[in-house]
């Protein structure tokens, strides 16, 4: 490992020095593990930091379920311009989806993870998970795992394909094309749903977590989720499968979704652990596949850096001083209200979803109830907090040894960022 592996690079604005100190402490605890942190406050970059062997500020990482945030920004834009209607049935856009009693499900219910189509009988292959159109075709005739609209549960690996197919039927364009045209390129975001081959030299492959549970207690690589995968810490961005919480049996970390309280079969289906169709240890090969990066599946296939992730939410929240906010206030408020309360049938967490986005205020107490975003399995997290004007992006190259989902250090970093912003306001 090079001597600069643990060194912190980058800058912070005056008043945010404590954030750099906290980031440095986090980096020191994991040595050369690559990470980035970027924060915008009312559109202005106030934190831009990175560390790790071979990592730069513009390095690109696999960010898994962070894709869901970008996907649902596109959905919100289409609702705002009248192309999509939240209370119209999914089957009115996509007739084939109406099979097996799904004909009355509304788009609002779909975005709130209430369809019951959390996976497919017999499991899904990596090839199906990589291609949203193929995945949507497989799911259209699937019998739901509960009566649509009667409960909610995290659609970890499929929500992007389901939302994307509604968008494709309504517009004739793929979600990925619309994201690139309406969000990524206009705002210059280094956050991709479909990474161009020209950007491949900046991509750093995802790395397995390290564990102390090897022979003699020595550290060594493990599958994502640690030595017990499946069953590592569950969290809002990642299971022991791409993009969501872990299978039953794992301990819950701070702020994590936790073990499922519903039937274990639902968790297994949602994370494709049934039927032999998916192994949790395929996470790395999935994310590190050029085909996955090129296709950019909208549930699991984000590639980007902290600048791009924070920039995505800064664009949604308040623009950048040159361009207007992506979302008008009415649309943002529509998408950031908790649509239904109760316990997630897959993860056991309460009130964890808004429309498409995760409710970040329930994870990070320092944030407002309308804070919205989405984590990614490697430990990344990103969000916008309308009350403070903060847009946050944290990325990692190596899976957290605590297990998939937003890594525990996000709590420390978010608290440091919010304190710095609060103190700046008082000053």
Image: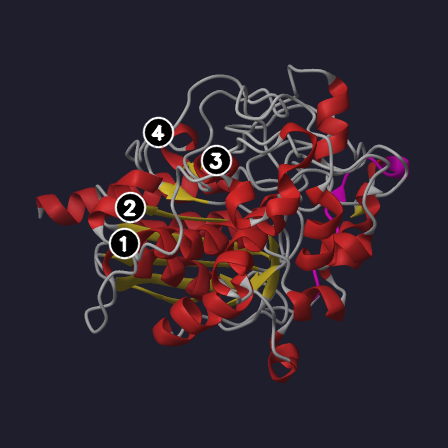
Q: Residue furthest left?
A: 427
Q: Quadrant of the N terminus?
A: bottom right
Give the mark toward the camera: 1 or 3.
3
Q: Residues within 10 Å of mark 1 (few under 14, many from 20)?
A: many
Residue at mark 2: 332
Vertical order, 366 against 250 (above or below):
below
Question: Along the polypeptide, which appears first: circle 2 or circle 1?
Answer: 1
**Residue 221 as seen in the image, left or right of residue 420:** right
Q: Given contact means CB atoms under 8 Å apart, are the residues at marks 2 and 1 in contact?
A: yes
Give the main secondary structure of the magenta stretch.
Answer: loop
Which residue appears at 23% of the width and 50% of the height? 389
Q: Residue 266: name its quadrant.
A: top right
Q: CA distance from mark 3 to mark 4?
A: 31 Å
Residue at mark 1: 317
Q: Residue furthest bottom?
A: 198
**Residue 161 as seen in the image, left or right of residue 208:** left
Question: Along the polypeptide, which appears first: circle 1 or circle 3?
Answer: 3
Find the magenta span and give its range. Answer: 205-216
Question: Along the polypeptide, which appears first: circle 3 or circle 4?
Answer: 3
Mark 4, secondary structure of its residue: loop
Q: Residues within 10 Å of mark 3 (few under 14, many from 20)?
A: many
Q: CA distance from mark 2 to mark 1?
A: 8 Å
Residue 414 appears in the picture as rendered: yes
Question: Whole-percent x and y of residue 378?
Answer: 63, 49
Q: Residue 168: name its quadrant.
A: bottom right
Based on the picture, tell me whether residue 223 belongs to the magenta stretch.
Answer: no
Question: Along the polypeptide, which appears first: circle 2 or circle 3?
Answer: 3
Give the mark toward the camera: 3 or 4.
3
């Amino acid at each position: 490992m090079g001597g600069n592996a643990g060194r912190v690079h980058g800058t912070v604005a005056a008043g945010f020095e404590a954030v750099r100190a906290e980031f440095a402490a986090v980096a020191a605890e994991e040595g050369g593990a690559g990470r980035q942190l970027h924060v915008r406050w009312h559109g202005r970059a106030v934190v831009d930091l990175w560390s790790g062997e071979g990592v730069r500020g513009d390095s690109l990482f696999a960010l898994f379920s962070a894709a869901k945030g970008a996907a649902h920004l596109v959905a919100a834009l289409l609702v705002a311009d009248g192309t999509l209607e939240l209370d119209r049935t999914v089957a009115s856009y996509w007739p084939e989806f109406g099979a097996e009693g799904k004909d009355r499900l509304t788009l609002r219910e779909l975005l709130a993870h209430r369809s019951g189509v959390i996976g497919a009988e017999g499991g899904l292959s990596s090839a199906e998970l990589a291609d949203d159109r193929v995945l949507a075709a497989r799911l259209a005739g699937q019998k739901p795992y509960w009566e649509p609209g009667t409960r909610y549960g995290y659609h970890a690996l499929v929500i992007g394909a389901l939302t994307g197919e509604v968008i494709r039927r309504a517009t004739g364009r793929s979600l990925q094309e619309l994201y690139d045209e309406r969000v990524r390129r206009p705002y210059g975001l280094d956050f991709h749903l479909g990474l161009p081959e020209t950007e491949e030299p900046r991509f750093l492959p995802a790395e397995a977590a390290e564990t102390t549970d090897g022979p003699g207690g020595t550290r060594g690589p493990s599958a994502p989720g640690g030595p017990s995968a499946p069953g590592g810490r569950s969290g809002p961005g990642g299971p022991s499968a791409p993009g969501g919480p872990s299978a039953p049996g794992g301990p819950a970390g701070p702020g994590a979704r936790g073990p499922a309280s519903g039937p274990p079969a639902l968790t297994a289906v949602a994370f494709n652990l049934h039927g032999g169709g998916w192994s949790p240890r395929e996470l790395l090969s999935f994310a590190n596949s050029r085909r996955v990066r090129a296709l950019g599946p909208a549930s699991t296939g984000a590639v980007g850096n902290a600048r791009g992730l924070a920039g995505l939410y800064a664009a949604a929240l308040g623009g950048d001083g040159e361009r207007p906010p992506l979302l008008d206030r009415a649309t943002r408020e529509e998408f950031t209200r908790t649509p239904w309360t109760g316990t997630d049938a897959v993860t056991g967490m309460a009130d964890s979803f808004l429309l498409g986005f995760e409710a970040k205020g329930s994870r990070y107490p320092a944030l407002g109830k309308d804070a919205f975003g989405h984590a990614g399995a490697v430990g990344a997290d990103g969000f916008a907090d309308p009350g403070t004007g903060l847009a946050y992006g944290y990325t990692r190259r190596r899976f957290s040894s605590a297990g998939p989902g937003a890594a525990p250090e996000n709590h420390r970093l978010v608290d440091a960022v919010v304190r710095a912003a609060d103190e700046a306001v008082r000053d």
